Amino acid sequence: MEFAAAWTYQNGTPGPLMAAGAADRALRPGLTVAICTYQRPASLSRLVDSLAAQERTPDALIVVDASANSATEDVLKAHACLPRVAGAVVYIRVIESMRGLPKQRNLCVRYVDTDLTAFLDDDVVLLPGCLAEMERQHRLLGNQVVGVGAVIEGDAAPTRLWMLRLILRMVPSLEPGRYYRSGMSTPWRFQDIEDDVVPVDWLPGGAAAWRTEIVQRLGFRTAFSGYAQGEDLEFSLRARRYGALYAVGGARLLHLHEPSGRPDSFARGYMAIRNRYQIHRIGVPDRTWKDVAWFIYAWTVDTVLLGRHLIRPSGGLQVAMEVSGRVRAAYDLLRGHS
């Protein structure tokens, strides 16, 4: 496989990237952190700082970079924490045909040799004890669990928008971390999980630790290309067939949303409908016409609610583009272009 750049750093020594291990190789006990990044050198550097400060640093760190230049690579190579951030560091910068979150994550897993893999977004910051607590809960729960997620710090109260969605029956409840047959998933933040371990239907893609064998078996769906909105939900719904998913209240991190490397408003709106429909089609067991009707109702109303922002003096153009993206996705789905 051709890479734009690839190297390793282990025991204080840089070296060339070795070939990926066989798919059926034995996995050793341990924890690998996998980070997929795109044009965010400063964010990645900040995340590496927080990784190096963890009481339990990862056994390996794998970074798959889709950037068009070497800025992120240069920052990582020069990072003062590189010698102590992990037992081994693997860096790969992919060519254009390999860009996209699912493709990058699938590539990461090919180089993992530990039984647990934690996927982190490049714009998060781990709070003390985060990695250790995710691993501890995995070991404690054993084979009954396939994945656990860290809790993103934030407001635990439901917003007015979510209260309105509940009133309009777009969702049957605001229980956190659930996926409903309307095709809507409730955020985790509606409950202060504290130190509890709470069962959920989905894990956030940028703050979750999975059993590596499950990720290698299932893979991330590459039909969700590029930014791949909703890929974490889609993967979670497939993975939970093999075991439980839990939110770990004792594992905390900050999500410092980085504006760069994100799709424009039209693309975001298009993915909101197109990807959610694909998830609904695949992820809802025994799906009936009533489920499809509920999906259409929920997302039509949600788009109308989004349109209320058009009356605001600022941001109206971005909202109009997002609504246009949703309408275009619905049109394409009706024409059979899924």
Image (cartoon, grey):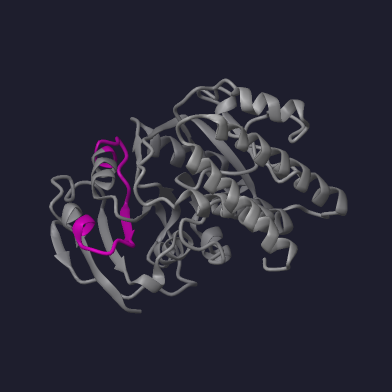
- The x, y position of residue 315, in whole percent, is 46, 36
The reply, left or right, for residue 10 in relation to residue 275 is: left
Q: Is residue 172 above or below residue 185?
A: above
Residue 200: name its quadrant: top right
Instruction: Name the residue: 53% across, 41% down.
Output: 319
The location of residue 291, given as percent across then percent down, is 82, 49
Q: Does the stretch in magenta take in 17?
A: no
As rendered, which of 314 and 114 lies closer to the eye? 314
Q: In which quarter of the image is the N terminus?
A: bottom left
**Could you tell me if residue 238 is visible in this image?**
no
- Residue 37: quarter of image: bottom left
Q: Quadrant of residue 172?
A: top right
**Above or below for 313 versus 65:** above
Q: Which residue lies furthest to the right in this view?
A: 289
Q: Which residue is drawn at 65% across and 34% down?
A: 305
Residue sitting at x 25%, y 36%:
53
Determine if the magenta segment contains residue 63.
yes
Count of numbered circles in the view = 0
Q: Can residue 131 be seen in this view?
A: yes
Q: Is residue 82 left or right of residue 138?
A: left
Q: What stretch is highlighted in magenta?
A: 50-73
Q: Is residue 149 left or right of residue 260?
A: right
Residue 261 position (above or below residue 103): above
